[in-house]
């Protein structure tokens, strides 16, 4: 069986890309098709994988300005040539599900979220769009929603990364999806190995033994990192922000003297930050909330907003605590609550192991086997159906 993967774009390393690499382990010889690719963003993680890009790759600096390529993505994915493949697995938060596959090929789409800027613009697009461009965005959004809805009907089967996303898929696309939670490598985050430390990388801003809270995410509006900044400003508590994105300058302006920004760091530094933090703060409405599982694997509790995927990845008083209002005061109370609770590392790691990489690949294999069987049955039934003359239809 010839297999190909399709991913929206390979321009930054985040949760969706981690999941893609885990899925790819099932078919290590399969190529990955994508719109844009920045090899320097992945520290060699795709060097043994054949990556095939769309015509967008030929546009100078397009990979660095991938958000500005928005109008061209539908055409880019339509242009990908997937002839000759029997199984196509798309990994998507937006466009990859729209790819066209051969008539007898099976298309499975792993959906991290329905296209956020179209269906939930208040979470994502509004605050990133310049004021002068907002009328244009409002005008084209209904048209793009219709296109996105049609694109979501193309895969034969959908897999959601959480029950939260499965509900959103039903709301937006009127389709059922199976649920397969994103994986976490528990042994990696429990390890203290420093062999992959970069010699040229600066140490974390807070010294060993100096307590700090941690935010580890892309700095986008829907992540609501400003809540964590405001709460730690008021508590005069140390906060380390790991990640980069369009909101960074605004967050730096809001930050008090106890808030530090580390930008994008190596995997070793990510692991060290998770292991050393007093608690991880997840202040947005997450699709799943992979960082909460990574924190649990590292033996660190999470303080999370009680909405979305965090309700599936955080266990109250066992792996973390929730705050219930999207306000600095509510978050402050939750942060203070953690100082009076004892979180057992063994309990947290046992929770994280429910989402292990091995369990993820085993469940994905079972889904694929079931889908192949159902797809073949449908194909045989369609082939056996009598042909009705057009004049009788």
Image (cartoon, grey):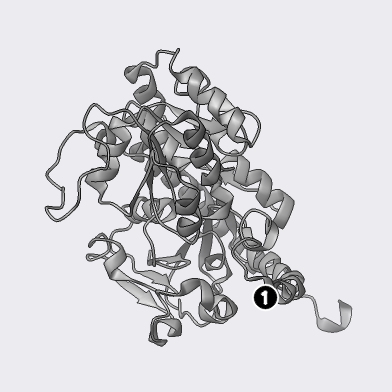
Judge whether residue 186 can be spotted in this image. Answer: no
- Between 153 and 256, the one nearer to me in the picture: 256
- Between 61 and 381, the one nearer to me in the picture: 61
Residue at image location 53% in from the left, 21% down from the top: 316
- Left or right of 72, for residue 343: left
Residue at image location 29% in from the left, 61% down from the top: 42
Looking at the image, which residue sits at the far right? 392
Q: Residues within 10 Å of mark 1 (few under 14, many from 20)?
A: few
Residue 109 spot, x, y in % from top left:
53, 58
Residue at image location 53% in from the left, 63% down from the top: 107
Residue 150 spot, x, y in % from top left:
69, 68
Q: How many marks?
A: 1
Query: On screen, 280 above or below 33?
Result: above
Q: Which residue is mark 1?
A: 133
The N terminus lies in quadrant: bottom left
Q: Quadrant of residue 11?
A: bottom left
């Amino acid at each position: 069986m010839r297999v190909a993967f399709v991913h929206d774009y390979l321009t930054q390393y985040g949760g969706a890309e981690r999941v893609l690499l885990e899925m790819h382990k099932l078919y290590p010889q399969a190529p990955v098709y994508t719109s844009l690719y920045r090899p320097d963003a992945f520290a060699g993680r795709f060097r043994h994988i054949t990556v095939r890009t769309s015509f967008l790759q030929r546009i100078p600096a397009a990979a660095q300005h991938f958000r500005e390529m928005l109008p061209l993505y539908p055409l880019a994915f339509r242009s990908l040539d997937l002839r000759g493949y029997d199984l196509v697995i798309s990994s998507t938060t937006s466009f990859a599900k729209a790819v066209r596959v051969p008539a007898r090929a099976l298309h499975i789409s792993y959906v991290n979220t329905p296209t956020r800027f179209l269906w939930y613009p208040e979470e994502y697009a509004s605050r990133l769009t310049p004021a002068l461009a907002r009328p244009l965005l409002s005008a084209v959004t209904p048209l793009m929603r219709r296109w996105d809805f049609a694109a979501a009907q193309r895969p034969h089967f959908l897999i959601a990364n959480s029950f939260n996303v499965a509900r959103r898929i039903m709301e937006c696309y009127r389709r059922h999806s199976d649920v397969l939670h994103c994986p976490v490598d528990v042994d990696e985050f429990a390890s203290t190995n420093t062999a992959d430390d970069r010699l040229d990388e600066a140490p974390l801003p807070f010294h060993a033994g100096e307590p700090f809270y941690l935010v580890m995410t892309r700095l986008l509006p829907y992540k609501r990192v400003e809540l964590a900044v405001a709460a730690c400003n008021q508590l005069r508590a140390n906060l380390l922000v790991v990640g980069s994105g369009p909101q960074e300058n605004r967050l730096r302006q809001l930050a008090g003297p106890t808030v530090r920004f580390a930008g994008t760091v190596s995997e070793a530094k990510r692991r060290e930050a998770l292991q050393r933090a007093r608690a991880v703060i997840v202040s947005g409405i997450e699709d799943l909330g992979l960082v909460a599982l990574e924190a649990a694997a590292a033996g660190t509790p999470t303080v999370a907003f009680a909405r979305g995927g965090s309700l599936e990845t955080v266990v109250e008083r066992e792996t973390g605590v929730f705050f219930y209002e999207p306000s600095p005061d509510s978050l402050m109370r939750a942060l203070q609550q953690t100082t009076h609770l004892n979180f057992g590392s063994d309990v947290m790691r046992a929770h994280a192991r429910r989402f292990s990489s091995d369990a993820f690949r085993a469940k994905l294999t079972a889904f694929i086997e079931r889908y192949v069987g159902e797809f073949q049955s449908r194909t045989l039934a369609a082939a056996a159906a009598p042909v009705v003359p057009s004049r009788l239809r």
